[in-house]
Amino acid sequence: MSELKNILLVKNLNSEESAKRIDASLAETRVDYEVNIEKQCVVVMGNSDMVAVARKVLNDLGFMIL
């Protein structure tokens, strides 16, 4: 079975600084992810539990998920 890819569109993810903040926080979790500034999104590889963790991290950082 292939990994599920979930794309979380993140409002105002438009700077290296924002990406680094997200990267630093998600790196402390078990989430397999990729931050994409160009598309203003975070791609989460995995199941809904991983997505929930990523959403919580983004919310805790103050980012709005579209």
Image (cartoon, grey):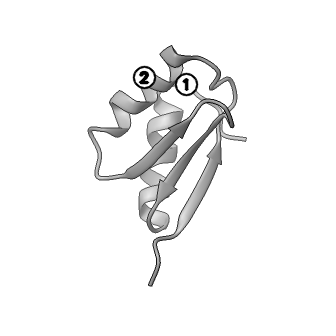
55 or 14, which lies in front? 14
At x 36% / y 52%, what residue is drawn? 31
At x 59% / y 17%, what residue is drawn? 15
Look at the numbered disc 1 and give the secondary structure of its residue.
loop
Q: Residue 65 location in percent, x, y?
A: 66, 39
Please state which amino acid type lies under the numbered disc 2. Arg
65 or 43, which lies in front? 43
For disc 2, the marked residue is 21
The image quadrant of residue 5 is: bottom right
Measured Cα–Cα span from mark 2 to mark 1: 11 Å
Q: Residue 28 location in percent, x, y?
A: 26, 38
Q: Which mark is residue 62?
A: 1
32, above or below 10, in the image: below
46, above or below 22, in the image: below
Say left or right for 65 vs 33.
right
Say left or right for 16 vs 28.
right
